[in-house]
Image (cartoon, grey):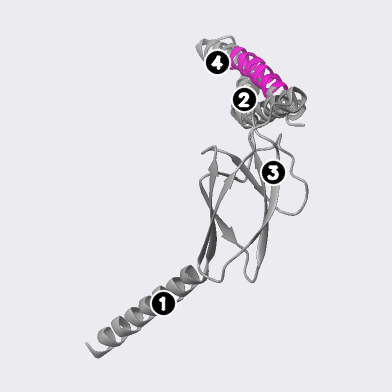
Amino acid sequence: MNLYRSVSLILIMLFVLCNNLFAQQKGSTRYLQISTNPSTVDLYTGDAPPDFSKNPAYTSPAFIPVPDGAESITVSFFHPDYADTTISITLSESDTSFIIVALRQTYDDELISSHQDMLKHRSRRNLGQTLQWFSIAPFVISGISAIVTLYDISKANDHKKAMENTRFMNEKYDVHMQEFKDYRKRAKTSKNVSKVFFGTGLLFLAAGFALSF
């Protein structure tokens, strides 16, 4: 009984300690809350010039985690009908900093056309990534079919050897002959299936890589 109480007490203390550590870690996390006009804008963080043809890190309104010790953070804003905006935001010492950013609408046809091209490029990249994921299924089916092919070939060879070891043309020989034909036919079918799905997987993968750039 004493041992049970001691173990229970230790488990409770560990649970409380873990909760306290988690609460401290959670409490120490700082955020930047961003709202924009227009209400939905793509957000990119970092000092390097962003590539707007890539998916945004966040979409407004958003809570952006702030690196420990950071006094400011650079955020770039993208909307196809508004001018590109990049600002360095000074953070407050509180847990959450808040800012509202109003973008300037643009009537520059060349800039709007450039933005639309970036969105089309982003869509192609997303399609490419999707095709790469889709290529997994054909490769898996091709692999399974290849395993089935090897199994059927092995069974066909076993029945072929049994036929060769049978001295007389009897019922047993006929059974091995039929099994040999069946397994050989199945092996050819599985081999063709494996080739078709392997080719399909390569096609999806190649198209996905081509569209991802």
Q: Nearer the viewer, residue 6 or 84?
A: 84
Residue type indicated by callout 3: Thr
Asked if the residue under mark 1 is in contact with the one under mark 2, i.e. CB atoms within 8 Å, the reply is no
Asked if the residue under mark 3 is in contact with the one under mark 4, i.e. CB atoms within 8 Å, the reply is no
Crowding at mark 2 (Cα within 10 Å: few <14, some 14-19, many 20+): many
Magenta span main SS: helix
Q: Which residues are magenta?
A: 183-203
User: Which of pointers 1 and 3 indicates the residue nearer the eye?
Assistant: 3
Q: List the residue tagged with mark 2.
A: 138
Mark seen at residue 179 = 4
The image quadrant where one finds the C terminus is top right
The residue at the point 62 percent across, 69 percent down is 68
Q: Does 19 appear above or below 204?
A: below
- Choose the circle earlier in sequence order: 4 or 1: 1
Mark 1 and mark 3: span between their CA atoms?
41 Å
- Choose the circle earlier in sequence order: 4 or 3: 3
Q: List the residue tagged with mark 1.
A: 20
The residue at the point 50 percent across, 67 percent down is 95
Q: Quadrant of residue 99?
A: bottom right
